[in-house]
Image (spheres, rainbow, N blue to C red):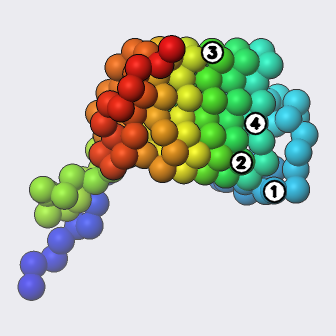
Amino acid sequence: MQNLKLYNNDWYNTGAGFVKRTLWYYINVLIFNHGLFPFNGLKIKILRIFGAKIGQSVIIKPSVNIKYPWFLHIGNDTWIGEKVWIDNLIEVRIGNNCCISQGAMLLTGNHNFKSENFDLITKSIIIEDHVWIGAKALVGPGVICAQNSILSMASVASKDLEKNTIYRGNPAIKVGIRP
């Protein structure tokens, strides 16, 4: 039997050293991903200390999981709901006046199923201004959610969402125009 290396991720840079990643892991578990820590202002300060770019009047609800805050940019007046998972192995940009609803997932990484080593693939996610990502929806690697678009609950965006358009389903398809 051939001895395979499971993952060929030598190229991947986490953006921080072991100590910073370890410290963030425990802070994420105890403060962000914990349902009993409701202090939004302190969460914002901690994210900024770890390198996140966070605008004004941002709300981060309890039980949010953030992989690497140093790859996170959030604009003004944006709301991140309970149990949102921002798996940002690379940059995630969320614009102004956005809503990322409960249980939504933003996933920047995947594995190449065509490779026998299942090599890691990462692509940024950009969520422009006035976008609503519905509850339990999933935004995949490399997706751009254009201004004023909506991804309905439990839908999966594996391709870009057009401006002023409503999407639903798995895979998400256009179902309407946003007024």
* Alpha-carbon span between mark 4 and mark 3: 14 Å
Q: Name the residue carrying label 1.
A: 35
Query: At label 2, which amino acid type do we have?
Result: Glu
Left or right of 133? Residue 172 is: left
Label 2 crowd bin: few (<14), some (14–19), many (20+), radius 10 Å:
many
* Alpha-carbon span between mark 2 and mark 3: 19 Å
Left or right of 143? Residue 35 is: right
Query: At label 4, which amino acid type do we have?
Result: Ile
Q: Which mark is residue 82?
A: 2
The quadrant in which residue 74 appears is top right
* Alpha-carbon span between mark 1 and mark 2: 8 Å
Q: Name the residue carrying label 3.
A: 96
The quadrant in which residue 107 appears is top left
Furthest-bottom residue in this view? 1
Q: Is residue 41 above or below residue 111?
A: above
Q: Earlier in the sequence, mark 1 or mark 4?
A: 1
* Alpha-carbon span between mark 3 and mark 1: 25 Å
Image location of residue 55, percent across then percent down: 71, 16
The quadrant in which residue 45 appears is top right
Please give the name of the residue rendered at 56% of the width and 29% of the height, measured from the top-left corner: 132
Query: At label 1, which amino acid type do we have?
Result: Gly
Left or right of 109? Residue 152 is: right
Q: Earlier in the sequence, mark 3 or mark 1?
A: 1
Q: Earlier in the sequence, mark 2 or mark 3?
A: 2
Q: SS class of the residue under badge 3?
A: loop
Q: Earlier in the sequence, mark 1 or mark 2?
A: 1
Q: Which mark is residue 60?
A: 4
